[in-house]
Amino acid sequence: IFTLSAVPFQRMPTSIKECFSVIKPGGMLLFRDYGLYDMTMLRFESDQRVGFREYMRSDGTRSYFFCLDTVRDLFVGAGFIELELEYCCIKSVNRRNGKSMRRVWVHGKFQRPM
């Protein structure tokens, strides 16, 4: 899943439970989405904030920035077993303009019990 951050936070548990319902026992779900303090989060203006760690883009889509505990609570709460869960921090440099971009992702691997 890479689009969960665009779902309103209140609807995330339902979305994850739906994923759980269609994955076969023993099946895996791989998760990667925005992490807390990603450069995208830091660029939002305060008036774009619509909830706790949740922002509205100018095109009307949402962005939520996850911490590990929130991801764990959402997926374990839906019935998944946590296999991996970590931050993935990447520094990317645009060689043309020399601009440095610091990205923070949350990477998770979850399994539906047998």
Image (spheres, helix red, strand yellow):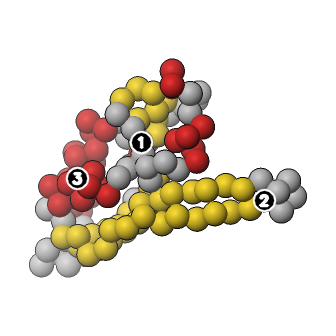
Q: Secondary structure at mark 2?
A: loop
Tell me if residue 16 comes above or below residue 46 in the rendering. below
Amino acid at circle 1: Tyr
Tell me if residue 45 comes above or below residue 14 in the rendering. above
Say whether disc 3 or disc 1 marks the residue closer to the N-terminus.
1
Give the CA separation, mark 3 to mark 1: 13 Å
Residue pictured at 31% horizontal, 73% vertical: 84
* Residue 66 horizontal/vertical position (percent): 37, 50
Give the CA separation, mark 3 to mark 2: 35 Å
Q: Secondary structure at mark 3?
A: helix
Q: Quadrant of the N terminus?
A: bottom left
Left or right? Give the position of 78 relative to 100: left
* Of the two numbered discs 2 and 1 in the rendering, the one whose residue sits closer to the viewer: 2
Q: Secondary structure at mark 1?
A: strand
Q: Are marks 2 and 1 in contact (CB under 8 Å)?
A: no
Residue pictured at 77% horizontal, 53% vertical: 99
* Residue 80 horizontal/vertical position (percent): 18, 65
User: Which residue is label 1 attached to?
Assistant: 64
* Residue 83 horizontal/vertical position (percent): 26, 75
Q: Are marks 3 and 1 in contact (CB under 8 Å)?
A: no
Amino acid at circle 2: Asn
User: Which residue is label 3 attached to?
Assistant: 74
Tell me if residue 4 comes above or below residue 23 in the rendering. above
Frontmost residue, 62 versus 88: 88
* Residue 68 horizontal/vertical position (percent): 32, 58
User: Which residue is label 2 attached to?
Assistant: 94
Left or right? Give the position of 34 relative to 75: right
Q: Residue at the right extreme?
A: 96
Q: Does residue 60 appear anywhere in the picture? A: no
Q: Residue at the top extreme?
A: 47
Q: Residues within 10 Å of mark 3 (few under 14, many from 20)?
A: some
